Amino acid sequence: MPEETVPGEMTAIDPAGLSGPENYRLLTGCVVPRPIAWVTSVAGDGTANLAPFSAFTMVSNDPPMVGINIGRRDGGFKDTARNIAERGEYVVNIPGWELWRDVHRSGEVHPPEVDEAALLGLATVPADVVGVPRLAAARVSLECRLARVVEFGRAGAQFTVGEVVRFHVLSSALDGLKIDTAAIDPASRLAGPTYARLGGIERVEGAAAPGPARAASPRDA
Protein backbone atom coordinates (compact mmCIF):
# COMPACT_ATOMS: atom_id res chain seq x y z
CA MET A 1 0.00 0.00 0.00
CA PRO A 2 1.32 3.49 -0.82
CA GLU A 3 2.10 5.73 2.09
CA GLU A 4 -0.61 8.25 2.98
CA THR A 5 0.14 11.69 1.60
CA VAL A 6 -0.72 14.63 3.82
CA PRO A 7 -0.96 17.88 1.80
CA GLY A 8 -0.28 20.18 4.72
CA GLU A 9 -2.15 22.18 7.33
CA MET A 10 -5.85 22.61 6.54
CA THR A 11 -8.11 25.59 7.35
CA ALA A 12 -11.73 24.88 8.39
CA ILE A 13 -14.29 27.46 7.22
CA ASP A 14 -17.91 27.61 8.36
CA PRO A 15 -20.10 28.72 5.40
CA ALA A 16 -22.93 29.68 7.76
CA GLY A 17 -20.97 32.76 8.80
CA LEU A 18 -20.24 33.89 5.25
CA SER A 19 -22.19 35.94 2.74
CA GLY A 20 -23.39 34.57 -0.58
CA PRO A 21 -20.55 36.24 -2.53
CA GLU A 22 -17.99 34.90 -0.06
CA ASN A 23 -19.29 31.35 -0.41
CA TYR A 24 -19.32 31.83 -4.19
CA ARG A 25 -15.63 32.77 -4.07
CA LEU A 26 -14.83 29.59 -2.17
CA LEU A 27 -16.96 27.32 -4.34
CA THR A 28 -15.53 28.61 -7.62
CA GLY A 29 -12.05 27.98 -6.25
CA CYS A 30 -12.94 24.43 -5.18
CA VAL A 31 -15.01 23.21 -8.12
CA VAL A 32 -12.39 23.45 -10.88
CA PRO A 33 -11.92 23.26 -13.75
CA ARG A 34 -15.49 23.96 -14.86
CA PRO A 35 -16.71 23.41 -18.43
CA ILE A 36 -18.22 26.49 -20.05
CA ALA A 37 -21.67 26.59 -21.64
CA TRP A 38 -21.60 29.53 -24.03
CA VAL A 39 -25.32 30.01 -24.50
CA THR A 40 -27.03 31.67 -27.43
CA SER A 41 -30.65 32.62 -26.88
CA VAL A 42 -33.20 34.92 -28.49
CA ALA A 43 -35.56 37.36 -26.77
CA GLY A 44 -39.23 37.66 -27.59
CA ASP A 45 -38.54 40.66 -29.82
CA GLY A 46 -35.94 38.73 -31.81
CA THR A 47 -32.82 40.17 -30.16
CA ALA A 48 -30.04 37.58 -29.92
CA ASN A 49 -28.02 37.12 -26.74
CA LEU A 50 -24.74 35.38 -25.90
CA ALA A 51 -23.59 34.63 -22.35
CA PRO A 52 -21.21 32.18 -20.62
CA PHE A 53 -22.11 29.87 -17.72
CA SER A 54 -19.52 27.73 -15.97
CA ALA A 55 -21.94 25.79 -13.76
CA PHE A 56 -22.65 23.33 -16.57
CA THR A 57 -23.01 19.56 -16.64
CA MET A 58 -24.55 16.50 -18.27
CA VAL A 59 -27.85 15.51 -16.63
CA SER A 60 -29.23 12.57 -18.61
CA ASN A 61 -28.28 10.38 -21.56
CA ASP A 62 -31.75 9.10 -22.51
CA PRO A 63 -32.94 11.52 -23.65
CA PRO A 64 -29.70 13.54 -23.78
CA MET A 65 -30.03 16.46 -21.39
CA VAL A 66 -27.66 19.11 -20.08
CA GLY A 67 -28.02 21.55 -17.21
CA ILE A 68 -26.75 25.06 -16.56
CA ASN A 69 -27.11 27.06 -13.36
CA ILE A 70 -28.26 30.62 -14.04
CA GLY A 71 -27.94 33.00 -11.12
CA ARG A 72 -29.81 36.26 -10.73
CA ARG A 73 -28.44 39.75 -11.19
CA ASP A 74 -29.56 42.50 -8.79
CA GLY A 75 -32.49 40.30 -7.78
CA GLY A 76 -33.82 40.00 -11.34
CA PHE A 77 -33.57 37.42 -14.08
CA LYS A 78 -30.62 37.50 -16.45
CA ASP A 79 -31.35 37.92 -20.15
CA THR A 80 -30.55 34.26 -20.83
CA ALA A 81 -33.02 32.98 -18.23
CA ARG A 82 -35.74 35.30 -19.47
CA ASN A 83 -35.14 34.37 -23.11
CA ILE A 84 -35.19 30.64 -22.38
CA ALA A 85 -38.43 31.02 -20.42
CA GLU A 86 -40.04 32.95 -23.27
CA ARG A 87 -38.80 30.84 -26.19
CA GLY A 88 -38.28 27.45 -24.58
CA GLU A 89 -35.16 26.84 -26.65
CA TYR A 90 -31.49 27.79 -26.79
CA VAL A 91 -28.08 26.55 -27.94
CA VAL A 92 -25.17 25.54 -25.73
CA ASN A 93 -21.91 26.22 -27.56
CA ILE A 94 -18.58 24.84 -26.31
CA PRO A 95 -15.82 27.44 -26.73
CA GLY A 96 -12.39 26.39 -27.96
CA TRP A 97 -9.35 27.72 -26.15
CA GLU A 98 -8.72 30.43 -28.76
CA LEU A 99 -12.06 32.03 -27.80
CA TRP A 100 -11.54 32.34 -24.05
CA ARG A 101 -11.10 36.12 -24.13
CA ASP A 102 -14.35 36.51 -26.09
CA VAL A 103 -16.04 34.23 -23.56
CA HIS A 104 -14.99 36.56 -20.77
CA ARG A 105 -16.04 39.70 -22.65
CA SER A 106 -19.45 38.21 -23.43
CA GLY A 107 -20.11 37.98 -19.68
CA GLU A 108 -20.01 41.76 -19.27
CA VAL A 109 -23.33 43.40 -18.42
CA HIS A 110 -25.12 44.94 -21.40
CA PRO A 111 -28.68 46.17 -21.95
CA PRO A 112 -31.09 43.48 -23.26
CA GLU A 113 -31.10 45.03 -26.73
CA VAL A 114 -27.36 44.36 -27.22
CA ASP A 115 -26.37 41.32 -29.30
CA GLU A 116 -23.09 40.21 -27.70
CA ALA A 117 -22.09 37.97 -30.60
CA ALA A 118 -22.41 40.85 -33.05
CA LEU A 119 -20.63 43.16 -30.61
CA LEU A 120 -17.67 40.77 -30.47
CA GLY A 121 -17.68 40.10 -34.21
CA LEU A 122 -18.64 36.44 -33.76
CA ALA A 123 -20.57 34.95 -36.67
CA THR A 124 -23.68 32.86 -36.08
CA VAL A 125 -25.45 30.34 -38.30
CA PRO A 126 -29.03 29.04 -38.17
CA ALA A 127 -29.67 25.95 -36.07
CA ASP A 128 -31.30 22.87 -37.61
CA VAL A 129 -34.15 22.34 -35.16
CA VAL A 130 -34.54 25.29 -32.78
CA GLY A 131 -35.14 28.89 -33.76
CA VAL A 132 -31.95 30.13 -32.09
CA PRO A 133 -28.62 30.57 -33.93
CA ARG A 134 -25.46 28.72 -32.97
CA LEU A 135 -21.93 30.11 -33.00
CA ALA A 136 -20.09 29.36 -36.23
CA ALA A 137 -16.71 29.21 -34.46
CA ALA A 138 -17.77 26.66 -31.84
CA ARG A 139 -16.42 23.13 -32.34
CA VAL A 140 -19.45 21.74 -30.48
CA SER A 141 -22.98 23.14 -30.33
CA LEU A 142 -25.98 21.55 -28.63
CA GLU A 143 -29.43 22.64 -29.75
CA CYS A 144 -31.66 22.47 -26.67
CA ARG A 145 -35.34 22.63 -25.78
CA LEU A 146 -36.22 23.59 -22.22
CA ALA A 147 -37.22 20.61 -20.09
CA ARG A 148 -37.23 21.86 -16.51
CA VAL A 149 -36.17 24.74 -14.26
CA VAL A 150 -35.51 24.18 -10.56
CA GLU A 151 -34.66 27.00 -8.17
CA PHE A 152 -32.06 26.47 -5.46
CA GLY A 153 -30.90 28.50 -2.50
CA ARG A 154 -31.96 31.81 -1.03
CA ALA A 155 -30.61 33.70 -4.04
CA GLY A 156 -33.00 31.92 -6.41
CA ALA A 157 -30.41 30.45 -8.75
CA GLN A 158 -32.12 28.50 -11.53
CA PHE A 159 -30.83 25.09 -12.57
CA THR A 160 -32.04 25.00 -16.16
CA VAL A 161 -32.24 21.61 -17.86
CA GLY A 162 -32.62 21.28 -21.60
CA GLU A 163 -33.06 18.29 -23.87
CA VAL A 164 -30.48 18.14 -26.64
CA VAL A 165 -32.37 17.84 -29.94
CA ARG A 166 -29.34 18.19 -32.22
CA PHE A 167 -25.59 17.73 -31.77
CA HIS A 168 -23.13 19.66 -33.93
CA VAL A 169 -19.55 18.37 -33.61
CA LEU A 170 -16.44 19.27 -35.59
CA SER A 171 -16.12 16.43 -38.12
CA SER A 172 -12.35 16.10 -37.72
CA ALA A 173 -12.85 15.54 -33.98
CA LEU A 174 -15.22 12.60 -34.52
CA ASP A 175 -14.45 8.90 -34.84
CA GLY A 176 -17.89 7.39 -35.17
CA LEU A 177 -19.58 8.74 -32.06
CA LYS A 178 -16.35 9.11 -30.11
CA ILE A 179 -15.17 12.69 -29.69
CA ASP A 180 -11.46 13.54 -29.53
CA THR A 181 -11.47 16.02 -26.65
CA ALA A 182 -8.00 17.27 -27.51
CA ALA A 183 -9.25 18.28 -30.95
CA ILE A 184 -12.09 20.25 -29.36
CA ASP A 185 -9.50 22.00 -27.12
CA PRO A 186 -12.18 23.42 -24.80
CA ALA A 187 -11.67 26.42 -22.56
CA SER A 188 -12.56 25.95 -18.89
CA ARG A 189 -13.18 28.34 -16.01
CA LEU A 190 -11.24 28.57 -12.77
CA ALA A 191 -11.71 30.97 -9.84
CA GLY A 192 -12.09 34.66 -10.59
CA PRO A 193 -11.24 35.95 -14.08
CA THR A 194 -8.99 32.98 -14.84
CA TYR A 195 -9.31 30.27 -17.47
CA ALA A 196 -7.51 27.02 -18.25
CA ARG A 197 -6.67 24.80 -21.19
CA LEU A 198 -6.38 21.02 -21.29
CA GLY A 199 -3.06 19.78 -20.00
CA GLY A 200 -1.75 16.24 -20.21
CA ILE A 201 -4.30 13.56 -21.05
CA GLU A 202 -3.80 10.04 -19.66
CA ARG A 203 -5.58 6.91 -20.81
CA VAL A 204 -5.87 3.69 -18.81
CA GLU A 205 -4.54 1.03 -21.15
CA GLY A 206 -6.85 -1.91 -21.71
CA ALA A 207 -9.79 -0.23 -20.00
CA ALA A 208 -13.09 -0.02 -21.83
CA ALA A 209 -14.81 3.32 -22.00
CA PRO A 210 -17.37 3.50 -19.16
CA GLY A 211 -21.00 3.52 -20.18
CA PRO A 212 -24.29 3.79 -18.30
CA ALA A 213 -25.73 0.50 -17.14
CA ARG A 214 -29.16 2.09 -17.36
CA ALA A 215 -30.66 5.34 -18.46
CA ALA A 216 -29.62 8.18 -16.17
CA SER A 217 -32.15 10.58 -14.76
CA PRO A 218 -31.77 14.07 -13.27
CA ARG A 219 -31.81 12.46 -9.82
CA ASP A 220 -28.81 10.30 -10.77
CA ALA A 221 -26.62 13.27 -11.75
Image: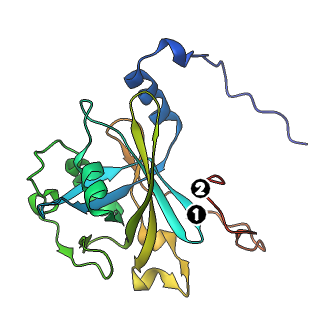
Q: Earlier in the sequence, mark 2 or mark 1?
A: 1
**x, y percent for residue 14:** 57, 15
Which of 48 and 122 lies nearest the eye of the viewer? 48
In the image, which disc is placed on residue 91? none
Look at mark 1 in the image and give the residue it sits on: 60
Mark 1: which amino acid?
Answer: Ser
Mark 2: which amino acid?
Answer: Pro
Look at mark 2 in the image and give the residue it sits on: 218
Q: Is residue 214 above or below residue 57?
A: below
Decide: few, some or many residues near mark 2? Use Cα within 10 Å; few <14, some 14-19, many ≥20.
few
Residue at 16% over, 71% down: 123
SS of the residue under disc 1:
strand
**x, y percent for residue 75:** 27, 30
Q: Is residue 218 above or below residue 26?
A: below
Residue at 27% over, 63% down: 87
Please indicate whether residue 22 sits to the left or right of residue 177 in the image. left
Residue at 64% over, 63% down: 202
Which of 29 and 160 lies nearest the eye of the viewer? 160
Q: Quadrant of residue 208?
A: bottom right
Please indicate whether residue 93 sits to the left or right of residue 176 in the image. left
**x, y percent for residue 32:** 50, 43
Q: Quadrant of residue 128?
A: bottom left
Residue at 74% over, 28% down: 6
Can you say which quadrant of the picture contains the N terminus? top right
Q: Which residue appears farthest toward the top when viewing the image? A: 17
SS of the residue under disc 2:
loop
Evaluate whether residue 92 shows in this view. Answer: yes
Q: Are marks 2 and 1 in contact (CB under 8 Å)?
A: yes
